[in-house]
Amino acid sequence: MTIKTIVLAAMVAAIPAVASAQATMRNGTAPAPIMDNPVDETGHTIGSAVTPTPLQATIPDAVLNQVRGSHVRSISVNQQVAPGERLPKAVHLHAVHDYPKYRFAVVNDQRMIVDPHSRKIMQIVQ
């Protein structure tokens, strides 16, 4: 084997490493390490930001006004009530007229819009 062949083989072998290094560096900085998020005793992630759902940003004013004007009794639950959290099955979800993809509930004296399929709170209504 000649030296040229050995050098060529070494260069070909190094190409994936160079490509990998380029993929991990952006603007001179390495990406943040991926870490497991800690969870509390109820299984909720601690210290994570709640990312708004696509529907949260597009909830029609008519839905918000209907929820604000409803006369529904509040139900008390012993859990955190915040966007992204799931409501227990014991909490009744009320229909929003003319908007079948939304439901609402009044829990712990807070009105909220809820995704009917996942039962996740989409938005607290002020």
Image (cartoon, helix red, strand yellow):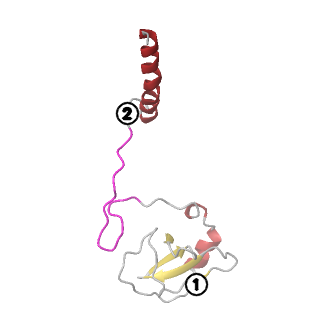
Task: Quadrant for the N terminus, please.
Answer: top left
Where residue 43 sits in the image (x, y, percent)? 35, 71
In the image, which disc is placed on residue 115? Answer: none
Give the alpha-carbon distance from disc 1 to disc 2, as whole Å: 49 Å
- Residue 6: name its quadrant: top left
Residue placed under numbered mark 1 in the picture: 94
The answer to which of 24 and 9 lies nearer the viewer is 9
Q: Which of 18 and 89 is in front in this view?
A: 18
The residue lying toward the viewer, choosing from 100 and 125, is 100
Q: Where is residue 114 in the image (x, y as percent from the top left)?
A: 54, 74
Please tell me which residue lies in front, 50 or 124. 50
Residue 24 vertical placement versus 72 (above, below)? above
Give the extent of the magenta segment: 31-49
Is 36 displayed left or right of 59 in the figure?
left
Return the residue at label 2. Answer: 29
At 37% across and 75% down in the image, what residue appears?
80
Q: Which amino acid does label 1 sit on?
A: His
Q: Which residue is drawn at 41% across and 10% down?
A: 3
What main secondary structure does the magenta stretch of the protein show?
loop
